[in-house]
Image: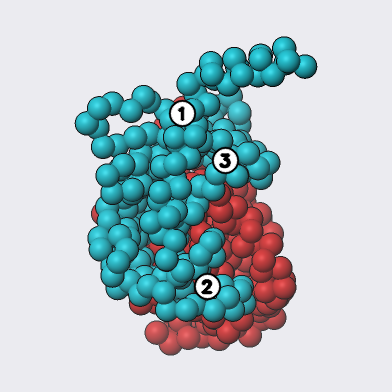
C-alpha cells in the first residue's frame, strides 16, 4: 500500500500528468459554452428527423444530454490521454535513469510493478471521473436538468430515460467507462514494461486502439467476424447503461471480457518485468 | 349568344357526377364544422404511449391547449413527443376553401360511414393526401389516413366521449409507417449499406379531464 501511495505521489508530482486533466477541462469548457451559444442549431440538427412527425416540448438539450454527447468522444480522445501516463509508468524509470535505484530497494520487482499498475489504474479512474464529473456539473449548471434522450444521429428512434432514473444510470455509465479505459491503461502499461523509453508505448498503444477500432467498424464480413476478438468492441459498454431495459447480461459479459484482458495484460507485464535484464 | 347559353344549360344538366359528389362531400364536413361551432377552446390531459421498436420511452404526459380555429400548444414537465398528424382534434382542420374534397367511394345504402379524399390546395400543405372516414349519423370523423409524398403514412382511429354538449376524442390509436432515414441523412459506405427498413408502430393517445370553453387567451399560445 505504501508503495502504491509512493507511486501515486510520484505520478501526480509530474507536470505531464496534468496535461490530460487540463486538456479535458479546456475541451469540456469550450464545447459546453459553444453548445450553449448554438443551442438552437444543435436542437434543430438533432431533432430534425422528428420535426416532421412530432411536436417536441420540454428541455431536450439538458445537462445529462450534453454529458452523454461529450462522452461519445471517449473512444478516441481519452485513450490517448491515458497512454500519456500509463505508457510512462515503467519505461519512465529507465528514461530518467532511476530504475537501478528503484530495484535495489527491499520491495520485490513484483510488488513494485503491481504498485505501478495500480497507480496507472488509479490515474485512469481519476481522469475518467474528472471528465464525467466536469461534463455533468458544468452541463447541469449551463443547461439545467431534464429527461435524457439518447438518439443516434440520422436514425428515426430514441430512448427516453426519465429524469429520476438518470443519476443512477450515469453512475453505472461512468463506472463502465472507467472499466473499459483500464484496458487501454493495461495495454500501455505492458508496452511500457517492454520498452526503455515512453514514446514507443504511448504511440504503440494508440496504434493498437485505432487499428482495432477501424477493424471493428469496417462493414465487411471478415471484420464483422473478427470484431468479437477485439477488446475495442466491448469498450462501448457504458452506452448500454442507457438502454431500456438495461441489458445486464451484455454489460456483464463485456465487463468480464475486459477484466480478463486486464488480468492477462498485467500478468504478461509482470512476468516480463520480473525476468527483465536491466542494462541501463 | 343563345347557342352559348344553350350549351351551358346542357353542360349544367349533364354535369359529371363527381362535381355533385364534391358538393355532397363538402356538406359532410360542413355538418361537422357546424356541430362543433360552439367549441371555442379546450384543455385536456394527454397520455401518450408508444409501441414502436425504435421508440423506447415510458408513457409521456402533457396538458394540451386548443383554441379555435387552429391554435394548439402542449405543456409538459418532461420531454414530450406529440404526433403532428392525427394526434389532436380540430373540427375545422379541413376547410373547404383550402382543400379539394371528394367522396372516395359511392355511398352505400344503410352504411353509416363515408370516405372522403382530401387534397390540399395550398402550396405549403401540398404533397399530402388525407382520407377521412366520417360517421354520417353522428357527424364524427372516425378515421384519418394521411399519406405524404415521401412515403410517410399515418392512420388515426378516433374514439369519442361526451364532454358537456360536445363529443371529443377519448382515445386515438395512431398507426405509423415511416421511412427510418431521411434521404439526405444517409451515411456509410453506400454499396455496403443495407437498405433501411421502415419504422412502423402504434401510438396510443388518451385524453382525460377536458375543460371546454374556458376562454383561453391568445397569450398562452405565444412561444416563450
* Chain A, hue in figure: red
The one nearer the camera, A159 or B206, is B206
Q: Residues within 10 Å of mark 1 (few under 14, many from 20)?
A: some
Q: Which residue is mark 2?
A: A59
Distance CA(mark 3)–CA(mark 1): 15 Å
Q: Residues within 10 Å of mark 2 (few under 14, many from 20)?
A: some
Give the mark nearer the N terminus: 3 vs 1: 1
Distance CA(mark 1)–CA(mark 2): 48 Å
**Residue A86 pos. (x, y %):** 56, 67
Whether residue A239 is visible to the viewer of this picture, yes or no, is no
Q: Residues within 10 Å of mark 3 (few under 14, many from 20)?
A: some
The one nearer the camera, A212 or B150, is B150
Mark 2, chain letter?
A
Q: Which residue is mark 3?
A: B99
Q: Which residue is mark 1?
A: B21
Residue furthest out toward the left:
B110
Does A148 appear above or below B5?
A: below
Q: Residue at x 35, y 75 (%)?
A: B211
Q: Is residue A36 left or right of residue A173?
A: right
Q: Residue at x 30, y 43 (%)?
A: B135
Query: In terms of secondary structure, where does tag 3 sit?
Result: strand
Residue furthest out toward the right:
B1
* Chain B, hue in figure: cyan
Whether residue B38 is visible to the viewer of this picture, yes or no, is yes
Mark 3, chain letter?
B
Amino acid at each position: 500500500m505504501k508503495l502504491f501511495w509512493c507511486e501515486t505521489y510520484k505520478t501526480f508530482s509530474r507536470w505531464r500528468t496534468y496535461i490530460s486533466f487540463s486538456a479535458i477541462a479546456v475541451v469540456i469548457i469550450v464545447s459546453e459554452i459553444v453548445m450553449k451559444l448554438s443551442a438552437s442549431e444543435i436542437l434543430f440538427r438533432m431533432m430534425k428527423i422528428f420535426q416532421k412527425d412530432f411536436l417536441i416540448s420540454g428541455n431536450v438539450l439538458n445537462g445529462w444530454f450534453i454529458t452523454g454527447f461529450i462522452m461519445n468522444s471517449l473512444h478516441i480522445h481519452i485513450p490517448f490521454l491515458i497512454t500519456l501516463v500509463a505508457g510512462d509508468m515503467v519505461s519512465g524509470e529507465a528514461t530518467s535513469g532511476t530504475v537501478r535505484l528503484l530495484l535495489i530497494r527491499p520491495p520485490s520487482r513484483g510488488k513494485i510493478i503491481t504498485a505501478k499498475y495500480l497507480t496507472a489504474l488509479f490515474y485512469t479512474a481519476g481522469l475518467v471521473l474528472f471528465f464525467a464529473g466536469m461534463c455533468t456539473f458544468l452541463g447541469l449548471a449551463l443547461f439545467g436538468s431534464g429527461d435524457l434522450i439518447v438518439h443516434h444521429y440520422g436514425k428515426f428512434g430514441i430512448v427516453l430515460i426519465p429524469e429520476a432514473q438518470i443519476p443512477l444510470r450515469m453512475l453505472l455509465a461512468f463506472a463502465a467507462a472507467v472499466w473499459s479505459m483500464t484496458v487501454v491503461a493495461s495495454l500501455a502499461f505492458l508496452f511500457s514494461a517492454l520498452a526503455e523509453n515512453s514514446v514507443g508505448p504511448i504511440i504503440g498503444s494508440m496504434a493498437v486502439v485505432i487499428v482495432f477500432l477501424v477493424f471493428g467498424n469496417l462493414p465487411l464480413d471478415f471484420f464483422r467476424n473478427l470484431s468479437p476478438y477485439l477488446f475495442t468492441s466491448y469498450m462501448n459498454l457504458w452506452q448500454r447503461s442507457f438502454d431500456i431495459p438495461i441489458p445486464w447480461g451484455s454489460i456483464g459479459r463485456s465487463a468480464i471480457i475486459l477484466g480478463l484482458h486486464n488480468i492477462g495484460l498485467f500478468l504478461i507485464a509482470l512476468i516480463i518485468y520480473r525476468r527483465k535484464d536491466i542494462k541501463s | 349568344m343563345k347557342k352559348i347559353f344553350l350549351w351551358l344549360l346542357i353542360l349544367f344538366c349533364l354535369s359529371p357526377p363527381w362535381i355533385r359528389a364534391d358538393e355532397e362531400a363538402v356538406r359532410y364536413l360542413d355538418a361537422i364544422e357546424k356541430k362543433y361551432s360552439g367549441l371555442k377552446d379546450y384543455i385536456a390531459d394527454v397520455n401518450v404511449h408508444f409501441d414502436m421498436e425504435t421508440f423506447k420511452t415510458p408513457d409521456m404526459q402533457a396538458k394540451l391547449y386548443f383554441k379555435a380555429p387552429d391554435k394548439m400548444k402542449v405543456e409538459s414537465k418532461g420531454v414530450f413527443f406529440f404526433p403532428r398528424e392525427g394526434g389532436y382534434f380540430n373540427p375545422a382542420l379541413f376547410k373547404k376553401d383550402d382543400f379539394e374534397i371528394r367522396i372516395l367511394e359511392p355511398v352505400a345504402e344503410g352504411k353509416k360511414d363515408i370516405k372522403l379524399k382530401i387534397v390540399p390546395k395550398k402550396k405549403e400543405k401540398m404533397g399530402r393526401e388525407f382520407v377521412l372516414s366520417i360517421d354520417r349519423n353522428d357527424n364524427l370523423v372516425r378515421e384519418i389516413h394521411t399519406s405524404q409524398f415521401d412515403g410517410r403514412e399515418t392512420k388515426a382511429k378516433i374514439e369519442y366521449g361526451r364532454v358537456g354538449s360536445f363529443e371529443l376524442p377519448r382515445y386515438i390509436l395512431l398507426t405509423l409507417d415511416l421511412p427510418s432515414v431521411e434521404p439526405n441523412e444517409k451515411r456509410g459506405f453506400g454499396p455496403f449499406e443495407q437498405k433501411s427498413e421502415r419504422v412502423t408502430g402504434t401510438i396510443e393517445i388518451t385524453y382525460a379531464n377536458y375543460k371546454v370553453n374556458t376562454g383561453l387567451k391568445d397569450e398562452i399560445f405565444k412561444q416563450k
